[in-house]
Structure formats: C-alpha cells, structure tokens
Amino acid sequence: KTGKKKSRIRLSSPLLLLIGIGFTSSATFMIFMNCNQELGVLYGMENPQLIQSFYSVGIVSAILLTSLLVKKGVKPIQILVSYPLAAFVTLLLMYLIRTPEICLIGGFLIGFFAAGGVLQLTTSTANEMYPEHKGTITAMVMFASAVSNYVVINVAGMLTTTGGQEGPRNILLFNMLVTLMGIILALVLNIRYGKEMGE
C-alpha cells in the first residue's frame, strides 16, 4: 500500500475553542426560542406569536446576507465574533427596554445574528482548520450543539420556575452570559487561527 496514513486529530486549543463555540452559538438562539413568548407576555404584547415570525425573517435575511459577505471575502471566523457581539447587544437592549416593540425588533435581530448560520460558519471554519478530519470535527461541533440544547433548556426551565414573574428576564441575563462566553471564545480563536494557518 502506497497511500499515506491519515494522521490522528489532536486535541488542540483551536479545536476546544471550536467545540465551545458550537455549544454557545446554539445556546443563544435555543434559549431565545424557548422564552420569547413568555417575555412578550411580560412586556405586554397582545400577540407574542409575532416574535417567532420576525425571528424567522431574521434567519432568512442572515442566510442571504452572510453568503454575500463570504463571497466578498469576509472570513467566516470574523463573523463568529461580530454576529454574537450583535446578539449580545440585542439581548441587553431587550433586558433594559420593556416594550412590546423591542420584542419584535429583538426577535428579528436574534434570528439574524444568532440563528442565521453561526453554527454552520463554525463547522466551516473547523473544516478549514482541520481539512483532514472534516467528518470528525463536524461531528464534534454538532455534538456540542446537541449537548447545548439539552443543558440550556433545562437551566432556562429552572430559572423560569424560580424567577416567578421576572423569570423571562432572568433567562435573558443567562442568555447574555452564554453569548458573552461565545464572543470570548471566538476572539481567542481569531488569534489562534492566525497562528495555526501561518498568517
């Protein structure tokens, strides 16, 4: 046999960062999906189901715009910082401004900046950094995403139970914390990414 033996994937800092981003990127929009209706009611919305509609429009808009940005030469790893940062600011505004309108605006922006492809861009970045292990690294990131869905929904449920009427706003704070963790991980990854790729 003359083929080269495939090297084993090593547990490196960038790999751990990518797995962490896989966790946090899913958590941001999963938490929002499971609490936006209650938040809308708390903020006096007559039809909180509208939040989900604005959220869906945000997702579609993000997919279209992000694909254009990537084609224009914007690196996916840069978006992994800017989009979560915008999502964090959105969550902060939703916590501070208690109006029905902010729920609709926030729904669109979270759909755009959190659910509109950040997880997919994470796997894309992972595949670029580990081209020999695309299947393995994608599985790792997606597994972190699946674990995230289970963990954050359970924590959000606890916050709802213990928080009483202010439960939805407590969940916003929790979401902000998770999103901030994702921003920090992405910033560190940007530094490590340059070193790994020899830039």
Image (cartoon, helix red, strand yellow):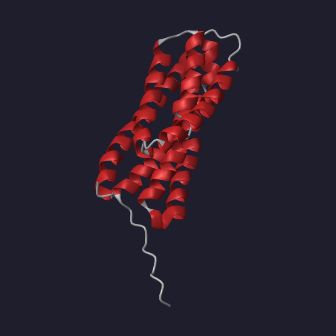
Q: Choose between 44 and 21: the one closer to the eye.
A: 21
95 above or below 199?
Answer: above
28 above or below 20?
Answer: above
Q: Position of residue 18 (x, y in %)?
A: 43, 51
Q: Choose between 2 and 186: the one closer to the eye.
A: 2
Image quadrant in which you'd find residue 164 = top right
Q: In the visual, does 193 lie left or right of 106?
A: left
Q: Residue furthest bottom?
A: 1
Q: In the visual, does 16 lie left or right of 100?
A: left
186 above or below 197?
Answer: above
Q: Residue at x 43, y 72 (%)?
A: 8
Q: Residue furthest front?
A: 72
Asked if residue 191 can be seen in this view, the reply is yes
80 above or below 108?
Answer: below
Q: Residue at x 54, y 25 (%)?
A: 109
Q: How many marks?
A: 0
Q: Position of residue 6 (x, y in %)?
A: 46, 76
Q: Choose between 109 and 61: the one closer to the eye.
A: 61
Q: Position of residue 60 (x, y in %)?
A: 63, 33
Q: Residue at x 60, y 26 (%)?
A: 35
Image quadrant in which you'd find residue 196 = bottom left
Q: Position of residue 114 (x, y in %)?
A: 53, 34
Q: Which quadrant is home to the C terminus?
A: bottom left
Q: Residue at x 42, y 74 (%)?
A: 7
Asked if residue 34 can be seen in this view, the reply is no
